[in-house]
Image: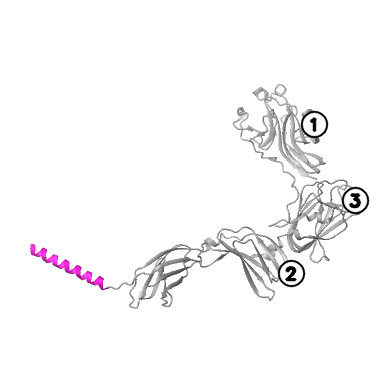
Amino acid sequence: MKNITYLFSILFTSVMLCIGCTEEGINTPPVVGDLIAHSGKYRAKVEFQAPAESMSGKIFYGSGKFQEFTIDKVEATQTIIVEELPEGEVILRVVTLNNKGETSDPKGVKVTIYGENYQKDLINRKLLSQRTISPTSIEMFFDNRNPDEVGVRVLYTNLSGVQDSVTMPGDHKSIVIDNIDLSETYYFYTVYKPTIDFIDEFAAPKIDAKEAAMKNFEKEIWTILTVSDEDPSRKASNIIDNEAATLWHSQNESMPHWIIVDMQSEKKFDGFHFVQAQEPGDTGFAKGFKFEISNDNENWTVISEGRFKANSHKQTFKFQESVVSRYFKISILDNHNEIAGAQIAEMDLFNDLNVSGINGENLPVLANSKQPFQGDGSDLFPLVGAGRFQKLTGWTHSNNAYISFDTSGGTFCVWSAAVWGLSLVTNGKIYQTCHILPGRYVLNIDVAHTTSPDCVDMYGVIATGTTMPDYSKVTSAPEVLGFSDLVANQKSVNTIPFTVEKASNVTIGVVYNTHDIFGATGIPWSDMNINGFELLTR
């Protein structure tokens, strides 16, 4: 037994010695040094120091895929571009081979590859405006840079007819393009790099800069080409000065009157905003109009004809389709009153991207004014249902106007039930205040119903100031601009015309009383429902 153990020990030692001799006989080349990788668009640039005895190598990626390369003995740093890599995080493993075909151990490096998933979210920097410096030179102005952006590139045709380009650095916001043929289409796009050492570049979709330029109005360089006539103290240039307080006033009383505006280059627009005089005076408001365009100031096309409303708020007129022109002509055909002469405070053009100026005040929109109305979430009389009766949001209520909203119908609903403990209302007021400019207006109140005309009195009221008059004074108070007896006109739209002489606060709402009809009818509640309020011009 001892002999067998001794023989086995000698055999094991011999085998291990042989294995050791075999491993020492293999000449494995050393691994590459200073390995780095720079990401690109579906590819990467790999750099490393190759061992002296290396002759070639392979770069492995994915599931067994690889790209072969030959060592450039002249270069100390080897540079290999690995193509057709998948988007996302990729590990590249580099091995080299010597002249005996012996392979080094792999050395790996991680790199993030970019592609369509990155490209699809790229947007262009916004072109804010363009200035024409000369017939062959322009300056383009852009908004703030986007993340990862390295610049904006402009593609154009130069005066020699050759395709050319210039790039605005990412930290700039404007660029001058000289020697440009402005009769040809030119483009721009935003250039991106997701990392500083990115070997490629991404580009947002190319934009027709000529069309984009046509959508930037440059109102500051507009001029009045001709005018039918003007008061020397209230010139036609006032309609394009971005000041609604100034105005053009004709001196001659005969109609029509007109103004031609030269925008200096072709512009593309979808309609125009019009602002009447802010203080109409004796001349009053313009009424009939005609809007024409031209590119040569000789041949004119009528684009729109219509009627201006008699008020000082901004009015908008949209064309059936976009138009392109250098000149536009606005003609005033008559007035809302019969006094001759014409006046305009301001005009602006607009398209889907820009507007030439922000001038004039929009007509106020009443808050929470149509069914379904919104309540304040209160629970004012849970006896008839949790949360059913509330107050309207956006409206002011007098202290006794307990309830103004019924969730069951989403209506403006005043309600009381004396026999159930909800007091009757005398001289209740529910209203909201807005600032209204001079002009003629209409308040439409769509009245639903009351359970009985004997259970409520209610006026719809428009009044100057910031509150409602008392119920007893509605028909006689000097501050009341218009009113309607809503109970007498229930289940109909009550149209209340009114006129505002000077810009002021105007309050719109209802004043009401409720009455107990339980003894006469057996009905314990008193109510009045309204479907909606709408403020309009006329």
Quadrant location, the N terminus: bottom left
Q: Nearer the viewer, residue 166 or 289?
A: 166
Element carrying mark 2: loop
The residue under the point 36% across, 68% down is 106
Q: Which mark is residue 225?
A: none
Is 153 left, or right, of 105 in this rendering?
right
Q: Is residue 123 magenta?
A: no
* Above or below: residue 354 compared with residue 482: below
The amino acid pointed to by label 3 is: Ala
Q: Residues within 10 Å of mark 2 (few under 14, many from 20)?
A: few
Q: Indicate which disc, 3 or 1, sits on the residue closer to the N terminus.
A: 3
Residue 8 in magenta stretch: yes
- The percent position of residue 233, horizontal first and vertical second, equals 86, 53
Magenta region, residue range: 1-25
Rendering coords of residue 480 (x, y %) = 80, 35
Q: Which residue is mark 2?
A: 135
User: Label 1, on which residue?
Assistant: 474
Figure check: 194 above or below 73: above
Is label 3 in a helix, a strand or a loop? loop
In the image, residue 47 lies at what x, y percent? 44, 69
| Crowd class of label 3 (few under 14; some 14 to 19; many from 20; radius 10 Å) | many
User: What residue type is disc 1 on?
Assistant: Val
Seen from the viewer's position, the closer of residues 213 and 315 is 213
* Residue neighbourhood size for the residue with mark 1, other residues' Cα within 10 Å, grouped as few (<14), some (14–19), many (≥20): many
Please name the residue that numbered disc 3 is placed on: 340
Give the Cα distance between marks 3 and 1: 37 Å
Quarter holding residue 456: top right
- Specify the color scheme: one colour
